[in-house]
Image (spheres, rainbow, N blue to C red):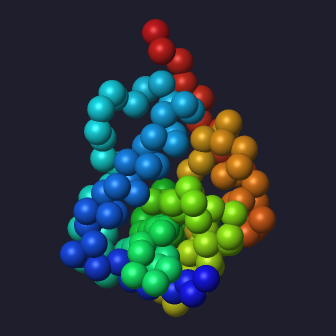
Amino acid sequence: MKLKIRQAQEHEIDVLLEFEQGIVAAERPFDDTLEEGEIHYYDLLELIKSPEAEVLVAVVGSELVGSGYAKIVDAKPYQKFARYVHLGFMYVKPDHRGQGINKLILEALLSWAKGKNISEVRLQVYDQNDSAIIAYSKVGFKPNLLEMRIEI
């Protein structure tokens, strides 16, 4: 497998939108607040264009097989770091999972954050998504905060 991690291109938006729907489908079992039908978490074109963000894709041959983004975010005024990088859009096509692709994307995004002199990186994961929690823990992420909700 000849794998390359590189920046996403605007002309790849259709495939990136498919990846986004794959993420939504994977998360629906964990979140009953998501609307039915097609929904969008990200403004992918804006992220691709932004100097404050990096959208990466994993490519095998000419096929896009994975993605992820890093975006610089202002922290709360009471937090240790003024800014941090938020990771999202983490996706690997089902037939390419288990090959370390997500880890390579994460490492490239962490390297981008370091290059921007950012010392903290955060991401969100559903507390019942055990496979994602294990994958992120292997890279060094630790649980930080559990958001709780009630529908009344």
Q: Residue 144: x, y in percent?
A: 69, 50
Q: Residue 4: x, y in percent?
A: 51, 86
**Residue most extreme to the bottom:** 115
Q: Is residue 130 above or below residue 85?
A: above
Residue 95 falls in image quadrant: bottom right
Determine whether, in the image, residue 121 is placed left or right of residue 20.
right
Q: Residue sitting at 59 percent across and 29 percent down?
A: 148
Front one among 100 and 138: 100
Q: Residue sitting at 60 percent across and 48 percent down?
A: 125
Q: Residue 115: x, y in percent?
A: 52, 90
Q: Is residue 143 above or below residue 68?
A: above
Front one among 80 and 53: 53
Front one among 141 and 144: 141
- How many marks on residues? 0
Q: Is residue 92 above or below residue 150?
A: below
Determine whether, in the image, residue 20 is placed left or right of residue 45.
right
- Is residue 146 visible from the viewing direction of this image? yes
Quadrant where the image shows the N terminus: bottom right
**Residue most extreme to the top:** 152
- Is residue 110 visible from the viewing direction of this image? no
Q: Residue sitting at 72 percent across and 44 percent down?
A: 130
Q: Residue 57: x, y in percent?
A: 44, 75
Determine whether, in the image, residue 30 is placed left or right of residue 33.
right
Q: Residue sitting at 29 percent across and 39 percent down?
A: 38
